[in-house]
Image (cartoon, coloured by chain):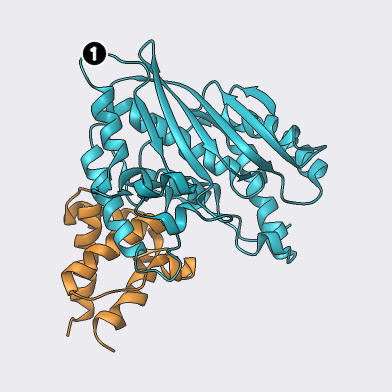
Amino acid sequence: MKFQTAEDIGSGWLAGFSSLQEKPDSALTLTIANPLMEDVGVRKEIEQTLVDLHAAGNANFATVQSMDTVASTIFPVDFYQAVGSAAHFFEQVALAEQVRSHSRRKRWGTYVGRLTAYPTPDGPANQLGVAIERLTLPKAWSSVIEIPVDAPGDASLALMRDGEHDRLLRSGPCLAHVSVTRTDDKLSMIALYRHQTYYSRAYGNFLGLARLLAFLAYESGLGVGELTIVTGHAEAEGTERQALLDRVRAAAGTVTPVETLARPFGADSSDLELPNSSR
Amino acid sequence: MATAAAVREALIRAIAETRASSVPEIEQSIRDAGGDDAVTIKSKFAEAVIARLETMFSRQLPAPADLDRTQFATIGALLFLLTPILQGV
């Protein structure tokens, strides 16, 4: 297991990716001290590389997504318009999941779907709603929130309604568990991944987790603490790792606050899309 | 059969509900942005809007996950996609 610490999401991605240079498959734990700051230069270089690899016909990158789209699978920030609007957020997520449920590509669903409507024998459980309830109890317990996203293994079958997907040996869900801890009026998060790809997903995952952490903290009247990501199998799935590392290091330095609320309707969002063309 | 104007009206109403906003506010934002083709819609947002349209028109509509990004990238694209379906063409 490799351990890395970093100040923001951009330097966190760089620290994690650097540690995968010699051995591109490793167990990796990364702690980001200030997850509400990201590096747009890092994000843009990763996205340009994805577009380049896709255009070159690399089979690992047959479909590529922007980091904002990856982040939205964990926390669709478009639905969170103001602090105190958790109920509206949950309603929009439920509607979105309703449409996704009749998609040909619905597979196991989405992370935010499992966070807000986890399949249990008693029906869907809104784990984020429960988390906010517990975090706003009069007594400030420090560690009372555990949020499973995936419940693999035969022993837990009796608890599951979605055993077919929770027992998948490959494919998602790769995020298995989220734990939040309250310390000194700040909320910190540990996310456990069984597998995480550093080219395609990691930066977007960090961004989505940071937004999820901010949502839980804001709705509970708490500050935002650290984000720790524990990955059993961290993978640098592309080629020319050193070249990408060099390019990202050169592009780094545009550290900006993470957007934790929706942009005004109609605002330009072209910066959140993948680049239009390869280099 | 819904007219093209009725489909657009329903779409704007669905957007307004998804944004917890009013139809006039949404229309103003669209004008400020430069029209239906200038307002970008992301996939999760499109899913929630389409869910509302499914209820309004009592029929199942395409899910963004099954579409190319360009088919739901703007309000104009959504209208181009959904109007013929909701008109029964």
- The residue under label 1 is A139
From this viewpoint, is residue A151 visible?
Answer: no
Q: On screen, B2 above or below A215?
A: below
Q: Is A210 left, or right, of A266 in this rendering?
A: right
Q: Residue at x 21, y 41 (%)?
A: A87
Q: Quadrant of the C terminus of chain A?
A: bottom right
Q: Chain of mark 1?
A: A
Q: Is residue B16 left or right of residue A145?
A: left
Residue B69 appears left or right of A264: right
Please tell me the colour of chain B. Answer: orange
Q: In the rendering, at what x and y percent does residue A222 appear?
A: 33, 19
Quadrant in which the N terminus of chain A appears: top right
> Looking at the image, is A113 positioned above or below residue A130?
below
Residue most toward the top? A184
Amino acid bearing label 1: Lys
Residue drawn 34% across and 61% down? B47
In the image, which lettered chain appears cyan?
Answer: A
Quarter of image, res A5 = top right
- Image coordinates of residue B28 in percent, x first then y, are 24, 54
Quadrant housing residue B36 = bottom left
Q: Residue at x 58, y 32 (%)?
A: A230
